[in-house]
Amino acid sequence: MRAWRHDPTSGIAYLASPDRFMKAILQLLGLGFVIMMVTSCGMPRVTKERNITYGEVGGEKLLLDAFYPQPKKPALRPAVIWVHGGGWSAGNKDAFAKGARALAQQGYVCFSINYRLVSNGRNCWPAQLDDVQRAVRWVRANAERFGIDPKRIGAIGHSAGGHLVTCLGTRETRDNSDAALAPYSSRVACVVDMSGPVDLVNQENPSVNQVVYNLLGGTTAGRPEAARDASPLYYVDAKSAPFLILHGQLDELVHPHQAERLDAALRAAGIESRLLMFKDEGHVLTKKENTDRMIRETLEFMKNHLAP
């Protein structure tokens, strides 16, 4: 069996040759450049606030970067939260900095967030869920500061980040013990899920068993309740947010059945879902025509549901 590896800078988890891995890195880091080429002409200036603390757990600060267009307008703006991938154990908020800045040029206030990473048996599930849910609630609590409409907050994530934003669109707050954030919902208004696993009970790829083991703190058989709790597919209901699901048919890490099952579950619940399955792509899009389509569809989806 090939070893699972992570690149700590880009946050990409991979089971591929070095050449293919480098393409994946370039694709992820280049995503923002591509969006900026499409959208930057005549767009407003963007201000970035870096390393804002949105919470603290066990002495570890939870940080995010904020990107917002200038000048501020009287009308409230929509917001988008970006969540990086990396097998829940690698990566950071810098992975989506360029994409967040570019989307801010379109009139959105964007937040690229860190969350606790699994490491040597620490920060197992549901630490990541609690953190991303806290980030959404923190944004709502600080809506006035950033000129945000708290009812119009979307989320974008890739791989493990896709899994986490799917949780944001399908379930309510798990830990509501913080009195300061108790009044605020953690559910987002729409979700863009890029290559995210949604069913860890039946994740369909034995090669990722170790990664799932690390997240859960045990096997899916040994920790069935945790595996189900970490599977947003089982939380889909009539209250779920609208979804845009992007997945590669050749994905070696997250089986395309995961995307298909999520799409089917959302539709069965009466929720809007659009699945774009790229037949010639893997875990990360590498072809320009597919990347261009992904950008167009994402911008249209965000516009339809958040209306900047």
Image: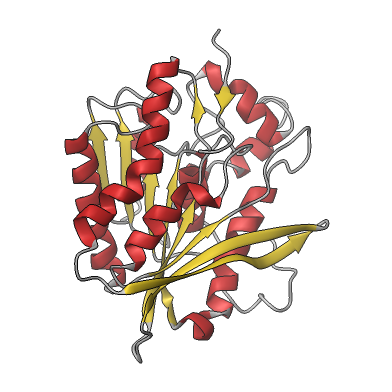
Residue furthest out toward the bottom:
74
The residue at 56%/79% (across/down) is: 142
* The furthest residue to the top: 1
In percent of width and height, residue 46 lies at 38, 71
- Residue 284: image quadrant is top left
Q: Is residue 278 above or below residue 69?
A: above
Is 111 left, or right, of 46 in this rendering? right
Q: Residue at x 50, y 33 (%)?
A: 12
- Classify 50 as above or below 250: below
Q: Quadrant of residue 283?
A: top left
Give the farthest residue toward the right. 58
Residue in view at x 45 percent, y 51 percent? 96
In the image, residue 118 above or below residue 107: above
Across and down, in percent, residue 42 comes to 20, 71
Closest to the observer: 212 or 299? Answer: 299
Along the line of sight, the residue nearer the viewer: 6 or 220:
6
The image position of residue 287, as x and y in percent, is 23, 31
Color encoding of the figure: secondary structure
Q: Quadrant of the N terminus?
A: top right
Which quarter of the figure is the C terminus placed in? bottom left
In the displayed structure image, the side of residue 216 where residue 1 appears, left or right: left
145 left or right, relative to 303: right
- Residue 172, image x, y percentages: 56, 62
Q: Quadrant of residue 26?
A: top left
The answer to which of 62 and 217 lies nearer the viewer is 62
Q: Is residue 30 visible?
A: yes
Could you tell me which residue is drawn at 35 percent across and 70 percent down?
108
**Picture layout, residue 43 above or below residue 115:** below
Q: Is residue 235 visible?
A: no
Describe residue 70's horizontal placement relative to residue 121 as left or right: left
Closer to us: 158 or 63: 63
